[in-house]
Image (spheres, helix red, strand yellow):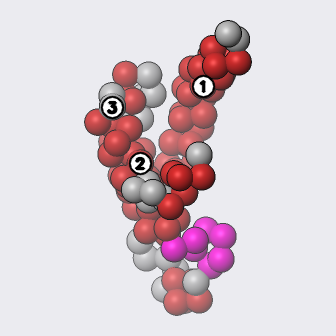
Amino acid sequence: MIDLAGGPYGHNLETILQTAVDENIKAIVKLTDQHCDAIRQASAYYMAKVFEYPAPGEVLLCYPNMPPIDVLFDAASVLVASLEQPCLKTKQQKVTP
């Protein structure tokens, strides 16, 4: 897991999303185009840790490239709700010999 932190994915939400789409995540997660756009927009802010440590320049400019937060929260909710059971099932399979 630690390899993912600095690997090709790191904190790049856009790369993670594209890989997930390429692997057909939409077959189990009903992400809309609006969700995907919001995730892509949030990627630069997430990589720069602006969500954790607000950048003064961004604050002064009122976060000009920030995606609609309600759409981003909805995307997160859809991801969690859709992936919870498959993740738990996979975890169970790995524990059970």
Residue under the point 44% across and 22% down: 28
Question: Callout 1: helix, strand or loop?
Answer: helix
Say above or below: 55 vs 1: below
Task: Name the residue furthest left.
Answer: 22
Query: Looking at numbered disc 1 in the image, what kind of residue is underneath it?
Result: Cys
Q: Which residue is mark 3?
A: 23
Residue 22's disc is none
Asked if residue 52 is among those painted magenta in the image, a careful observer would answer yes
Name which of mark 3 and mark 2 comes first in the sequence. Answer: 2
C-alpha span from label 1 to label 2: 17 Å
Residue under the point 45% across and 57% down: 7
Q: Which residues are magenta?
A: 48-54
Neighbours of disc 3 within 10 Å: few (<14), some (14-19), many (20+)? few
Neighbours of disc 1 within 10 Å: few (<14), some (14-19), many (20+)? few
Q: Which residue is mark 2?
A: 16
Query: Looking at numbered disc 3 in the image, what kind of residue is underneath it?
Result: Glu
Query: Looking at numbered disc 2 in the image, what kind of residue is underneath it?
Result: Ile
Q: Which residue is mark 1?
A: 87
Name which of mark 1 and mark 3 comes first in the sequence. Answer: 3
C-alpha span from label 1 to label 3: 16 Å
